[in-house]
Image (spheres, coloured by chain):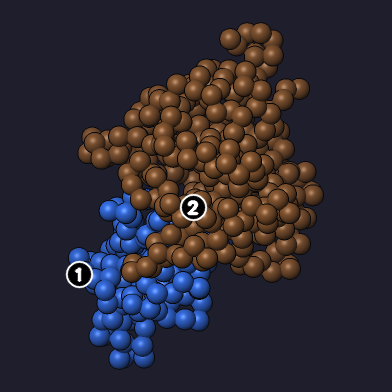
Chain colours: A brown, B blue
Amino acid sequence: MGSLKYGVSVYSYVNDFGSVMTLEDAFDHIADTGATGIEILGEGQVEGYPEPSAAWLDTWFGLVDRYKLEPTNMCSWIDTRVTLTRNLTVEEGAADLAQDLRLAHRLGFKFLRPKFGVTSHELDPDPQWEAYVERNLDLAHQLGVVICPEIHAPTPIKHRVTDAYIAFIERTGTKNFGLMIDTGIFQDRPLTHWGSHQINDEMRQHMAFLNGIAVPPEQFLEIAQYVVFIQAKFHDIDDSLEDLNIPWRPVMSAILRSGYSGWLSSEYEGLRSPWRAIDQVRRQQVLLRKLEAEYEAGLLA
Amino acid sequence: MLEHQLIQSTGFRNIGPVGARTGFAVRIRIPNYHGTRLSQLDGFTVTVDGEVFPFEHNRLGIRDEVYTLAELREETSARWGLLEWGEILVDKPGGLAAGIHKVEVLARIRYSYFPPDVHVFPMHEARLATLCMA
């Protein structure tokens, strides 16, 4: 067995969940891939968010126990532009983050990904992010939860956003804040669909990231010491087990050579069509394990 | 469970007393992949058989509350969960005729993590829907 841990995000099943898939179905699909971790959207899979009922909590823990899945990461959002006329104050943003940390901990999650509001097309987070997080570092430490904002296309690794998060880690010396890498940053071939839409030329002009920002996988090695979680974003794996957008061979090679030993959490984000994600996730789980085995056999440089 | 599409079949109905209908309702899922505060929604334009009912005038009913657009924009406590439905309430004296209609919804949802100039994101869906009782 290798050093990586494999999980699946329920977000992968976004076009099934709630209409053709229950939470228990999602647990079943994930466990059957051989994955041992489950990632969720807090305000998505948690009914009654932010204060689920005792009955729902019983259901949750029953599923975790029955399917032997470990809660990995819970995703949350900080609604910076809370109304059209005003932004959250630092106190409000910090309180929302605290609420999600407590909920994540209560459900057994070890990681929390807050999505901060942004101020630019390069996705610079609202500068208040630093105060939201700093005010919660002690709480995160007490709860044993690591806060991990994601580095997500179109933001590459070599960028002021990543630099600022790393500077924060260095300045505070915290172990409760780290980087989440979304492997969509390594996408080097164009997507064909975005959501349920076929991508046209106009969309490509306005959203160049749909063609892939192609971060060189080797750059992962430079920031690996700060990476605490990987969302294994992907869109389309064909009938020959080839990923049409993400270059997994060099990506897995870099991840494995870095010594990263955390979660790889499948995050399907391809064509939004019911029933499509279930098998796509299975394909990715097979593909990633196969590459890890090749690496261990010395076949993956 | 909910129907897969944004616009639900059930819940497309006239409102107000029979013979003196005041309008109609269109039941939808949350137009997002996760639940949100209601203030993250910025109204719903509804089009039925080509007749446009602009978002500024429509209300949202969820659970036991009804919100005007102004109220929706300021509602930072109440939330809409992924597994809950809401209904767009549209004024139309006399209501709609029973039968099959082409119904379109343009939902305006706000994402703080989208760049500010594009943070009101339109989500459009259209379908044929059947209104049962005039």
Tell me residue A140's x, y (percent). Answer: 67, 52
Locate residue B56: give its quadrant.
Answer: bottom left
The spot of residue A161 in percent (x, y) is 44, 39
Mark 1 vs mark 2: give the one in front. Answer: 2
Question: Distance from label 1 to label 2 (Cα)?
Answer: 44 Å
Question: Which numbered dot is residue B51?
Answer: 1
Can residue A276 be seen from the camera position used here?
A: no
Q: Can residue A80 be seen by looking at this rendering?
A: yes
The quadrant in which the N terminus of chain A is found is top right
- In the image: residue A80, left or right of residue B124: right
Q: Which mark is residue A129?
A: 2
In the rendered image, residue B9, in percent from the top left (x then y), is placed at 42, 65
Of A86 and B77, the residue lying toward us = A86
- Vertical order, A221 against A210 (above or below): above
Count of number-bearing discs = 2
What amino acid is labelled 1 in the image?
Glu
Left or right relative to A224: residue A190: left
At 42% across and 52% down in the image, what residue appears? A126
